[in-house]
Amino acid sequence: MSAISKSEFREEKDTFGPLRVPLDRYWGAQTQRSLQNFEIGGEQARMPVPLTRAFGVLKKAAAAVNMTYGLDERIGKAIMEAADEVATGKLDSHFPLVVFQTGSGTQTNMNSNEVISNRAIEILGGKLGSKDPVHPNDHVNMSQSSNDTFPTAMHVAAVLELNNSLLPNLTTLRNALADKAESWSNIIKIGRTHLQDATPLTLGQEFGGYAQQLTYGIERVEAVIPRLSLLAQGGTAVGTGLNTRKGFDVKIAEEITKITGVQFKTAPNKFEALAAHDAIVEASGALNTLAASLFKIAQDIRFLGSGPRCGLAELSLPENEPGSSIMPGKVNPTQCESLTMLCTQVFGNHTAISFAGSQGNFELNVFKPVLISNLLTSIRLLADGCRSFTNNCVVGIEPNESKIKAIMNESLMLATCLNSELGYDNVAKAAKKAHSEGLTLKDSVLQLGLLTSERFDELVRPELMISPKD
């Protein structure tokens, strides 16, 4: 097909009449009509590839099940072969439609039907555009409606992307942070609350907190997968299952499970599955929470690595590229900046998803394309961001132990350990005197006659301040 000149066309027909379609494309009239009617957003607004590939999985499964209900085996096998090419990405370039189309995603369902129909016709030696012997509606879309195929493809795409992309990369980042926490368990540093000095903790404890945030993030993402694994297929137009056979919904979920190797089940209530997309909103909520966690972690690491001479400089971050076009030698925390930026995009995507998810008017939510586009974008950004942050930042972070120790020894909040010995008011008096007069905490305590030098040294030991007393 690729050898055919793009200047050549063939005629395709739908119920509105004939249209010219590029000869080297498998799509038909309805896809072409959508291209003409929705010139919105350009290439960046195209329907996500994971979704169109999920349609390949779905159409392959549908053909397999429909053959058990009477679909001609020769046609069914050709559909399955063509659909497999869609599912494996061989026909990605034949899915040109944008997200901003009909809210049910009907044109993308028909794009899938037309591409698979024409490819199956080609496999069987027929003429493209003839709809013979494989019809896009009668055969490829048999027992289906856009209203149940699109939400099914939404869920299949989301589950596969979470399992295959986000969770592995998120787990790797969590493990990298946990490794740092273990390695730095004996490095004592000053804590900070309200961006002010606080009591000590270890650098390992600080990074252990980051690792725990991501452990919870993994659990939250995993917790939404069971509901995303429930499929709308079999509900057809409004959830009643019109034009299907009993058991079709169960069989197609089983077939999709077989094709993907991931467990899917039929949704117990098809009316909910078509009219609402609460599972998508819930999944986006988990991603939104994860983005909040990642933002905090990247922000902290950026601040802890600030400097190198005039900042906190407790951490040395990997130097990956020049940081300024005017300041020679400057290096910036670019991985932290990249991760925080993509997190803000996830926050925005979740806002769009939240509103779109609320628009399930009566029997059909008609914001389906923007729901899945934003969700898949968030998954991709977070997966890629976690991988990049791990490989290009976290694994290469080193502690600046001399700086950490110097900052900690200057902190007046070490005075907190004296509360039980001197009482809050006396300790506060010593800390304020030290701050206002530029003294060390020890000199202030001694000048006030609150402790001897030996007793101060016995009590003010940071290593005794990082855990509860026995």
Image (cartoon, grey):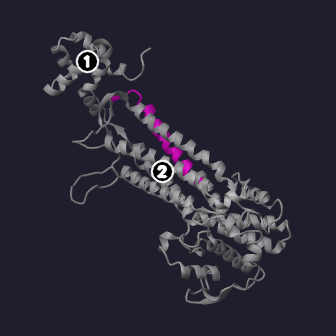
Q: Is residue 463 above or below residue 206?
A: above
Front position among marks 2 and 1:
1
Residue underneath mark 1: 425
Q: Is residue 246 left or right of residue 27?
A: right
Distance of label 2 from label 1 (alpha carbons): 50 Å
The front one of 233 and 259 is: 233
**Residue 134, image x, y percentages:** 76, 79
Mark 1 residue type: Asp
Residues in magenta, as a range: 164-189
Q: Is residue 302 above or below residue 268?
A: above
Q: Secondary structure at mark 2?
A: helix
Residue drawn at (20%, 24%) of the image: 432
Q: Quadrant of the C terminus?
A: top left
Residue at the extreme left: 437
Q: Residues within 10 Å of mark 1 (few under 14, many from 20)?
A: few
Q: Earlier in the sequence, mark 2 or mark 1?
A: 2
Asked whether residue 223 is drawn in magenta, I would say no
Residue underneath mark 2: 387
The front one of 189 and 322 is: 189
Residue drawn at (21%, 19%) of the image: 430
Q: Is residue 396 left or right of residue 411?
A: right
Mark 2 residue type: Arg
**Residue 361, image x, y percentages:** 61, 63
| Res 51 visible | yes
Asked whether residue 185 is drawn in magenta, I would say yes
In terms of secondary structure, what is the magenta stretch mainly? helix
Residue drawn at (79%, 69%) of the image: 243
**Residue 328, image x, y percentages:** 21, 55
Residue 251: quadrant of the picture: bottom right
